[in-house]
Image: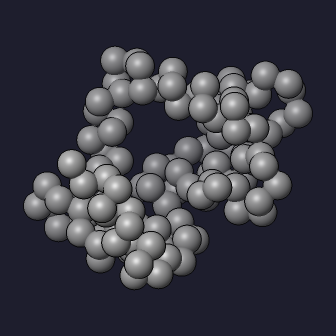
Amino acid sequence: MLFDKDEDGTITMAELGVVMRSLGQRPSETELRDMVNEVDQDGNGTIEFNEFLQMMSKKMKGADGEDELREAFRVFDKNNDGLISSTELRHVMTNLGEKLSDEEVDDMIKEADL
């Protein structure tokens, strides 16, 4: 999973912080803790996959969901041409710690290309 750097099946506060900072956000430790606590149903201090899905579902249903999607798109669209090229996708994914082959990047572009 992209956010789960140690691949233990959960997202820690530290892992969430790394991802958010790589996407241009600057959450404080308190904000990160609040985000984890908001969705951490079992109280273990981490976000399991089902908790993550519920969090994202709520976030996208909110009034700001479309704005957040647009902002996320802008993170990938480095040259602001309204398109995400394979180079731009590779750059962002590398910043997130994901080393992708050319084939993997091409597959992602093909999968998302409407």
The N terminus lies in which quarter of the figure?
bottom right
On the picture, is 101 further left or further right than 33? Answer: left
Q: How many marks?
A: 0
The answer to whether residue 4 is left or right of residue 56 is right
Q: Is residue 50 above or below residue 98?
A: above
User: Hey, which quadrant is residue 81 in on the image?
Assistant: bottom left
Q: Residue at x 69, y 30 (%)?
A: 51
Vertical order, 9 against 96 (above or below): above
Q: Is residue 78 left or right of residue 89?
A: left
Whole-percent x and y of residue 107? 38, 67
Its colouring scheme is one colour
Tell me residue 62's x, y (percent).
40, 18
Q: Residue furthest right?
A: 44
Closer to the camera in the image, 51 or 45: 51
- The single residue placed furthest to the bottom in the displayed view is 102
Tell me the quarter of the picture where residue 83 sits: bottom left
Q: State the residue in front, 12 or 8.
A: 8
For residue 77, what is the image quadrant?
bottom left
User: Measured along the vertical axis of the image, is residue 52 above or below residue 61?
Assistant: below
Residue pictured at 42% horizontal, 26% vertical? 60
Report whether residue 30 is seen: no
- Given residues 98 and 40, the one toward you in this image is 98
Tell me if residue 41 can be seen: yes
Measured as percent of width and height from the top left, residue 61 is found at: 41, 19
Q: Position of residue 97 (x, y in %)?
A: 57, 71
Identify the residue at image location x=29%, y=72%: 86
